[in-house]
Amino acid sequence: MNYTNEDYENAVMDQLTSLHVDQGGYLLTLAPYAGQMSEEVALEQFVRGFPGILVIIADSTYAFKDNLFWTQDVAVKCFIGARSWRSQDEARGNDTGISRILMDVRSALMGHRIGLLIRPVEIVREEFIMGDPSTVLWGAEYLIINDNVFMQNQEV
């Protein structure tokens, strides 16, 4: 089954929807990321929406499978931000810090097919990006493997 990057992005965001405040969760922001983070204003806007997650399809690689199909490996990156560090959350009795968000994203994505005809989603890495005394930003990368990308033969 051939999917677009938007299809993958939407499937990931749908899988995380229960974490959004509109669905009874705690995330103020759950949105696609379009590279705008390089602009200081965009980062400030994201921080105002903490806790939050921005989702991007970072890249896709392909491997030949047979005469009709290829395997597609899709890297999904989530930028995960919270207003405070874990110890500050614990001191206030607030359990929506970065550790909980990372765990909830893991639970929502890892091992699930996210409504698509793919292998179960795999986790690749979680990494600290930046932080200060009041905010923290982490990245989480997941792998989607689609074994049935149809490639039409262009030769005549």
Image (spheres, rainbow, N blue to C red):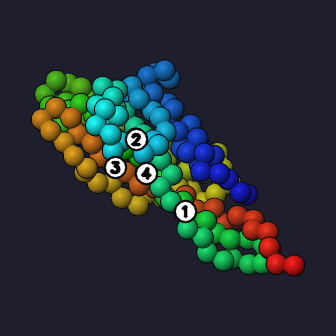
Q: What amino acid type should be assigned to the residue bearing mark 2?
A: Gln
Q: Earlier in the sequence, mark 4 or mark 1?
A: 1
141 sits to left or right of 47: right
Residue labelled with disc 1:
60
At label 2, counting other C-alpha atoms closer than 10 Å, the crowd grade (few under 14, some 14-19, many 20 or more) is few
Asked which secondary structure carries label 3, the reply is: strand
Judged by depth in the image, the label closer to the viewer, 3 or 1, is 1
Are circles 3 and 1 on residues that touch, CB within 8 Å? no
At label 3, counting other C-alpha atoms closer than 10 Å, the crowd grade (few under 14, some 14-19, many 20 or more) is some
Are circles 4 and 3 on residues that touch, CB within 8 Å? yes
Residue labelled with disc 3:
139
Residue labelled with disc 4:
77
**CA distance for labels 4 and 1:** 12 Å
Q: What amino acid type should be assigned to the residue bearing mark 4?
A: Lys
Q: Residue at x 19, y 42 (%)?
A: 131
**CA distance for labels 3 and 2:** 15 Å
Is there any visible trace of residue 105 in the rendered image?
no
Q: Earlier in the sequence, mark 2 or mark 1?
A: 2
In the rendered image, the vertical position of residue 57 relative to residue 29, given as above or below:
below
Q: What amino acid type should be assigned to the residue bearing mark 3?
A: Gly
Residue labelled with disc 2:
36
In the rendered image, the vertical position of residue 127 relative to residue 45, given as above or below:
below
State which quarter of the image contains the C terminus: bottom right
Judged by depth in the image, the label closer to the viewer, 2 or 1, is 2
Asked which secondary structure carries label 1, the reply is: strand
Q: Earlier in the sequence, mark 3 or mark 1?
A: 1
